[in-house]
Image: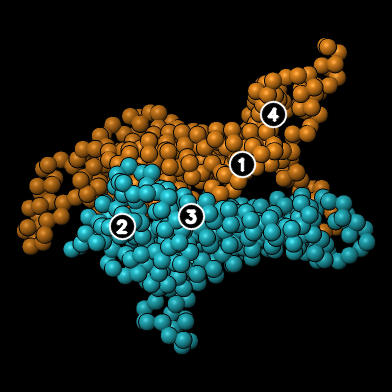
Amino acid sequence: MAAIDTTLTRKPPSSSSHQAVARVSKAILRNRKATLGLVMFLILLFVALFPDLITSKPWNESVVPPAVIAQCQQDAVAAGKVPNCSQFPPTWPDYPLGTTQLNYDVLSQLVHATGVTLFTTLLISLLVTAISVVVGVTAAYAGGRGDLGLSFTTDVFLVIPALPLLIVLSTYLASGGIAAIVFVMTITSWAFGARQLRAQGMSIRSKEFLEAARVRGERSWYVIFAEILPNMLPLIVAAFLGTSVYVVATMAGLQFLGFGNVGDTLTWGTMIYQSQQSMALESGNIWWLLSPIIAVAFLGTSFALLNYAFDEIANPALRKSNRRRRAQPAA
Amino acid sequence: MRFIGRRMALFLLTLWAALTLNFIIPRLMPGDAALAMWSHIHNATPAQLAALEAEFGAAGQNPVVAYFGYLGNCLTLNFGVTTDQVPVVTKIMQGLPWTIGLVGVSTVIAFALGTLLGMYGAWRRGSWTDNLLSPLLFIVTTFPIFFLGLVLLLVFGVALHWFPTNHPYSTPPTLSVASVADIGYHAFLPAVTLVLAAAGGWIYTMRNNMIATLSEDYVRMARAKGLSSWRIMVSYSARNAILPNLTGFAMQMGFILGGSILVEYIYSYQGLGYLFYQGTSSRDLPLQQALFLLYTVAVLIFVLLADFLTAWLDPRTRTA
């Protein structure tokens, strides 16, 4: 039996997960895009984990001293104007990004929202990827009717436009809190990954090492967890990163429109919505609107850079090889 | 023929699934949708509540009868009336031309631009388009659409006053040259937003597909035959590389239609997306339901067209 094992179970080199992790981390450090993406992500993670190191001010209390507001009101009355003493412009170091309509510190809000946004995004992406893997790999492994049913369900979810569906669902779940957002984001986003992973699963289905495992009489769960999934790891990570790019943008877009903002949970999307509602732009309080928008783009870009680089790592054909290409008589 | 039959069957099945989903959602969700909406109508009458309950479900209703009634209404385009008592179909017809124009033009531009740049980038790897322009457009694509829309609006609309910041036109549209120019002028920023949001993805996938086809034997064969490089690039490599992109094109329509909601909201562009936003904000469920269905059907039709086009361009798929 041992002899058969060694001859029949030759796996591709990537199947040892230890080696795969080492290979991936080396590749990330070597790839400039990946390094940049990782650094951007780590910066946000740092802000999310240690908000007190960035700012010690509360995010949900007025930070403008009552004396300043009283002075402002006096001045306005003296000048014969309607007193409008909120949304103070940026003042270093008191409130570097200005204040909101309730005179909360925008920087503190931004920092506080970093954690909520980041962890919600990661949670949704993890759930989405998990569903994609389960549906995609099961469909590929089961084949036959099971595959037909799962593929059809995937196709249906794939063609239904996600943002409109999200908006429809969020009208009904407005009172459900952040869990409702996680739920609707998850069920509207898994189809794309499931289809990709099914295709990949189909392509390794007939590989020899799987045939060998089946001949050895291994159980299905062993084949799936020990043989199929490790080989699909790069693609699963790529699916996770791609999903994250999408989730960041979509959640913020939904909240920007005013749907899916829940109570006292402050995300970047909710900040954008609130600043729009309070006419931040018209009041010249531009950073209240711009800073969360830039933060969303920053997080999205960090995931996108990692994803872009990961495609190159997983697919060697895409790597740059200028010298060889230039040598070809292209023109 | 068999291929077309199978595709049509999938189309009809998906259409049925989407219709059913649209029927189920208001009934599955917590709360009484009909009652919630009825309370939003000014001077509402009990007759209106009965009509809403027929559409969105109520206690004690026979779900089977309601379901077939709903399917019949959808097939006859009878979507009821909005909260301000205008037929939903009338409202949709008012918004439809603006969205078709905006989304249609920008999608075609994005697809053409992306495919050409992707093709050229793969052909001349390491050139400045490949090293600078394409990655730049790809990064821009990953920005949220509302980010692009707001930044363009702030810079070119609010700060520089180069372009209008809202509405699809300033004088009621006619067929004169001035009116068409006015419409184009108003559509410029929203269209650029959608093009920027979509083009990068096309470049990226086209470039990757093209790199794969360039290493195929038939391309080497074409080189060996001494064919012109233009011909190798366009009719050998690109023709095959574009096939997966056609299916992607149809799938992208869902993303673009979703994006058009955000863009139309940002630019107060009174198309379907703006209508959808308004319908949702004011809890106008018949309007919201009909538009959601319309979006889904539009994507489905594009998927079907892309399948036929792929089959026409690639004989291999006809037997698959």
**Which of the two discs, 4 and 1, sits closer to the camera?**
1
Please tell me the numbered disc located at residue B52: 2
Q: Which residue is mark 1?
A: A149
Cα–Cα span, label 4 and label 3 = 36 Å
> Percent from the top left, x then y, of residue A139?
65, 37
Q: Which residue is mark 3?
A: B19
Say which residue appears at 45% left-offset and 42% top-offset: A185
Q: Earlier in the sequence, mark 2 or mark 3?
A: 3
Q: Position of residue A189 (x, y in %)?
A: 51, 44
Q: Which mark is residue A228?
A: 4
Q: Which chain is orange?
A: A
Q: Is residue A49 visible?
A: yes
| Identity, as a three-letter code, of the amino acid under mark 3 | Leu
Q: Nearer the viewer, mark 4 or mark 3?
A: 3
Q: Are marks 4 and 2 on the same chain?
A: no
Helix, strand or loop at label 4? It is helix
Q: Are marks 1 and 3 in contact (CB under 8 Å)?
A: no
Asked whether the residues under marks 2 and 3 belong to the same chain, the reply is: yes
Q: Are marks 1 and 2 on the same chain?
A: no
**Crowd tier of the residue under label 4, counting other residues whose Cα lies within 10 Å: few below 14, some 14–19, many 20 or above:** many
Depth check, front residue: B105 or B166: B105
> Which chain letter matches label 1?
A
Q: Locate residue A11 relative to residue B94 in the image: left or right.
A: right
